[in-house]
Image (cartoon, rainbow, N blue to C red):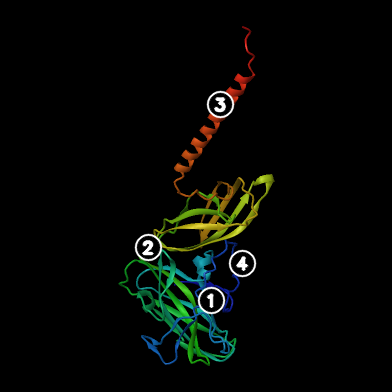
């Protein structure tokens, strides 16, 4: 039986709640909202799962907001040091296992709203954690049940829900991804349906034995200065483990000119797929001196942490490359003109010297 610990405070529409009291310090978690997915479609227009919901920036100016908050309440005791498990459902289970997690949902709208709770597909690719549209289903989302599936909430009212993930006995080994969504919808004065969603990611590894290892490598640190003078530190990161990673951390610069130091500067690299690579770019203050500096980059994904150090310099602003126009004709003409001028000057000098020479006596 899995023992759970409380993972956080009540839900918030904009930011994750505070960390659990007593949790050990950890590197900054990446702020990658799976909320803020508003969508609109003409009222009455039907799609495969009801009224369509295509991306939109904002509802109508006079319409009540369609915002909702969601937060995970539970995390396994064995993951009390894994900061990811306090934000997302992150676990490894054997086939035939059933796990449960409590979540809390909040209506952040100004009016009474009906909140729908469900799971939908997601994936991790070279682009990061990719959300499927609407209620698209995959294997993992088909294993997930949320109770209640729907709840009517007053403004700022919260409700607790139970998420059950039942893994079939014949499930194949591997890591799967999904999102647990809370969704509210409304129609503004223009008869446009606005949809707001907030979600909790699910990273579920299935297989016999213990959890597959997580790991990554950080390549050499490189400094450069862009054309506008902005210094940038880059490093290539490769996922060497068997689970997807959500990388975040910080950069520190020390031993700079005159003993200067800078940082820590927060770093976010997003979600890194299995066997994937990404280039971490840390944009720094344009006033930062060229260096050299002693750089230390710390990255972490949950309890998996790595560091890289090195001497870096940011150098001067790059000089634009010369154009490829052929100027050999101009060079040749200039050379000939210069040679002609030299010959003329030499002839004048010889003539004047000859005129001034005295005539010998007869």
Comparing labels 2 and 3, the label whose residue is closer to the camera: 3
Task: Tell me which label, 1 or 3, sits earlier in the chain.
Answer: 1
The residue to which callout 3 is attached is: 347
Whether pointer 4 and pointer 2 mark residues with C-beta atoms closer than 8 Å, the reply is no
Comparing labels 1 and 3, the label whose residue is closer to the camera: 3
Residue 274 in percent (x, y) is at: 40, 61
Task: Tell me which label, 1 or 4, sits earlier in the chain.
Answer: 4
- Indicate the secondary structure of the residue bearing disc 3: helix
Q: Real-space Cα distance between discs 3 and 4? A: 96 Å
283 relative to 183, above or below? above
- Indicate the secondary structure of the residue bearing disc 1: loop
Count of numbered badges drawn on the protein: 4
Q: Real-space Cα distance between discs 2 and 1? A: 27 Å
The residue to which callout 4 is attached is: 22
- Indicate the secondary structure of the residue bearing disc 4: loop
Task: Tell me which label, 2 or 3, sits earlier in the chain.
Answer: 2
Mark 4 residue crowding within 10 angstroms, few (<14) / some (14–19) / many (20+): few
Comparing labels 3 and 4, the label whose residue is closer to the camera: 3
Point 49% across, 66% down: residue: 78
Whether pointer 1 and pointer 3 mark residues with C-beta atoms closer than 8 Å, the reply is no
Q: Name the mark on residue 73.
A: 1
Q: Is residue 211 visible?
A: no
Q: Real-space Cα distance between discs 4 and 2? A: 30 Å
């Amino acid at each position: 039986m899995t023992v759970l610990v409380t993972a956080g405070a009540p839900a918030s529409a904009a930011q994750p709640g505070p960390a659990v009291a007593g949790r050990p310090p950890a590197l900054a978690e990446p702020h990658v909202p799976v909320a803020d997915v508003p969508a609109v479609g003409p009222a009455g227009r039907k799609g495969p799962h009801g009224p369509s919901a295509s991306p939109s920036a904002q509802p109508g100016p006079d319409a009540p907001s369609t915002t909702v908050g969601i937060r995970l309440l539970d995390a396994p005791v064995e993951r009390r040091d894994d900061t990811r498990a306090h934000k997302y459902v992150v676990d490894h289970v054997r086939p035939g296992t059933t796990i449960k997690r409590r979540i809390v949902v909040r209506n952040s709208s100004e009016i009474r709203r009906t909140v729908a709770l469900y799971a939908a597909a997601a994936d991790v690719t070279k682009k990061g954690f990719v959300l499927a549209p609407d209620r698209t289903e995959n294997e993992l989302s088909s294993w997930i049940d949320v109770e209640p599936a729907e709840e009517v909430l007053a403004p700022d009212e919260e409700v607790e829900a139970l998420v059950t993930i039942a893994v079939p006995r014949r499930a194949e080994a591997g890591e799967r991804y999904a999102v647990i969504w809370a969704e509210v919808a409304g129609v503004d004065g223009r008869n446009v349906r606005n949809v707001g969603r907030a979600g909790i990611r699910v990273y579920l590894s299935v297989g016999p034995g213990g959890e597959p290892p997580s790991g990554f490598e950080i390549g050499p640190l490189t400094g450069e200065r862009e054309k506008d003078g902005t210094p940038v530190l880059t490093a290539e990161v490769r996922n060497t483990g068997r689970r997807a990673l959500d990388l975040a951390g910080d950069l520190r610069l020390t031993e700079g000119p005159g003993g200067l130091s800078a940082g820590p500067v927060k770093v976010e690299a997003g979600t890194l797929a299995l066997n994937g690579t990404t280039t971490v770019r840390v944009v720094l203050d344009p006033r930062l001196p060229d260096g050299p500096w002693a750089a230390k980059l710390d990255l972490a994904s949950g309890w998996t942490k790595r560091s890289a150090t090195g001497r870096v310099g940011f150098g001067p602003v790059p000089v634009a490359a010369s154009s490829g126009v052929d100027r050999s004709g101009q060079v040749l003409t200039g050379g000939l003109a210069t040679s002609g001028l030299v010959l003329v000057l030499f002839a004048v000098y010889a003539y004047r010297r000859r005129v001034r020479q005295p005539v010998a006596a007869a």
